[in-house]
Amino acid sequence: MTTDVKKKFYWRKKKVCKFCVDKIYYIDYKDVELLQQFLSDGAKIVQRRISGVCAKHQRMLSRAIKRARIAALLPFISQE
């Protein structure tokens, strides 16, 4: 009893770094609207593989988010 079940393969389009495309060389910690796009609902920093940001910009992004949290521009945890 062998059944030939063909599996469907879904090819995902490779994510491109938003900052590399827009040629942003410095991520400012005071740009709160930009930084909030990379925070989850629980105010955690979104992973690289989910956001599609390259390693260099992910490091700059996490540094900017941490600085904005210390300056009280972003929350450390979400208020539920």
Image: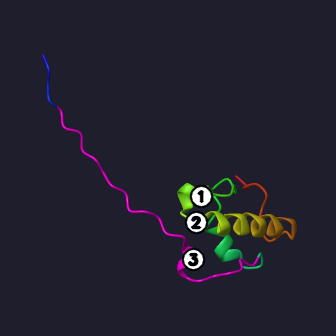
Dot 1 or dot 3: first in sequence order is: 3
> Which label sits on residue 48?
1
Which residue does the numbered mark 2 point to in the structure image? 53
Q: Nearest the camera: 13 or 76?
A: 13
Q: Which residue is mark 3?
A: 20
Q: Earlier in the sequence, mark 3 or mark 2?
A: 3
Query: In the visual, does 9 lie left or right of 64?
Result: left
| Residue shown at 65% from the left, 61% from the top | 39
Location of residue 50 (image quadrant)? bottom right
Tell me if mark 3 has few (under 14), some (14-19) or many (20+) residues whose alpha carbon lies within 10 angstroms of its own. few
> How far is the residue under mark 1 from the one under mark 3?
14 Å
Q: Residue furthest right?
A: 70
Q: Residue at x 49, y 69 (%)?
A: 16
Contact between marks 2 and 1 (CB within 8 A): the answer is yes
Tally of numbered tags? 3
To which quarter of the image does residue 66 belong?
A: bottom right
Q: Residues within 10 Å of mark 2 (few under 14, many from 20)?
A: many
Q: Residues within 10 Å of mark 1 (few under 14, many from 20)?
A: some
Magenta range is 5-28
At x 77% / y 75%, what residue is drawn? 29
Circle 1 SS class: helix
